[in-house]
Image (cartoon, helix red, strand yellow):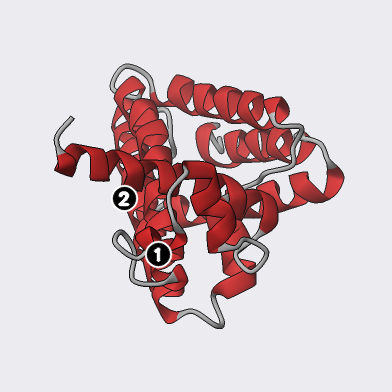
């Protein structure tokens, strides 16, 4: 493995472990020493990859978001045939994922929004960029669903994508409080009733 590929592999390891620890322990509860110990590199080497812990947190947000974008992109791809079915598959997969984690982890961006959005400008700005990327994918799905006749055309794709994301983040937070995916099931039912069924 070349040095550049090895360095990229180490960076990916740091981000994978960082995301897991940030979700489990929070930003302030996670130390750089803990992270580098998991990877097996000296603490000083950490700064070859990231300028600071705050920069590391911002890059962890992007890393987490990229994984979720892949999840959303798969839904968008499925929606080419049937957007309503794709949305149901989204909920099935998300609920199964959170059940496998005993409803404890939640969403990194939701967790960070509560913990660092007031104290870290770069963290807040990075989260805003990532959330808007998620929204763009959801808008694509919604527009396609409207074209197929599965989603109401009298609803703005922009507003509906915002509503979906806001509803989703609130449902995930409630899930963590209740220790149950019931809030996500309720979201599925409410969103389906609101957006997918005819008002006639």
Q: Please state which of the two labelled residues, at mark 2 or mark 1, is closer to the viewer.
A: 1
Q: What residue occupies the far top of the structure in this picture?
A: 81
User: What is the number of the mark on residue 115?
Assistant: none
Are there few (<14), some (14-19), or many (20+) residues within 10 Å of tag 2? some
User: Is 39 on the left or on the right of 141, as rendered?
Assistant: right
Whether residue 155 is situated above or below residue 87 in the rendered picture: below
Mark 2–mark 1 distance (CA, rounded to whole Å):
39 Å
Whether residue 127 is situated above or below residue 78 in the rendered picture: below
Question: Which image quarter: residue 95?
Answer: top right
Q: Residue at x 55, y 31 (%)?
A: 197
Q: x and y percent of residue 93 in the render?
A: 56, 24
Q: Residue at x 60, y 50 (%)?
A: 21
Residue of label 2: 136
Are there few (<14), some (14-19), or many (20+) residues within 10 Å of tag 1? few
One can see residue 164 in this view: no
Observer-nearest of 27 and 94: 27
Q: Residue at x 43, y 49 (%)?
A: 41
One can see residue 47 in this view: yes
Q: Secondary structure at mark 2?
A: helix
Residue of label 1: 44
Observer-nearest of 183 and 43: 43
- Contact between marks 2 and 1 (CB within 8 A): the answer is no
């Amino acid at each position: 493995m070349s040095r550049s590929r090895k360095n990229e592999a180490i960076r990916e390891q740091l981000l994978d472990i960082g995301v897991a620890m940030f979700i489990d322990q929070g930003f302030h509860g996670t130390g750089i020493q803990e992270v580098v110990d998991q990877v097996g590199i000296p603490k000083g080497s950490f700064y070859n990859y990231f300028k600071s812990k705050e920069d590391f947190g911002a890059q962890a947000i992007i890393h987490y978001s990229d994984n979720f974008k892949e999840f959303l992109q798969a839904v968008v791809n499925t929606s080419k045939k049937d957007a309503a079915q794709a949305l149901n598959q989204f909920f099935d997969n998300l609920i199964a994922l959170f059940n496998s984690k005993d409803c404890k982890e939640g969403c990194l961006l939701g967790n960070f929004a509560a913990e660092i959005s007031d104290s870290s400008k770069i963290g807040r700005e990075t989260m805003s960029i990532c959330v808007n990327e998620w929204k763009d994918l959801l808008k694509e799905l919604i527009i396609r669903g409207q074209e197929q006749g599965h989603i109401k055309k009298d609803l703005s794709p922009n507003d509906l994508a915002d509503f979906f994301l806001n509803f989703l983040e609130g449902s995930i937070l409630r899930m963590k409080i209740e220790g149950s995916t019931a809030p996500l099931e309720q979201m599925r039912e409410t969103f389906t009733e609101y957006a997918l069924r005819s008002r006639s």
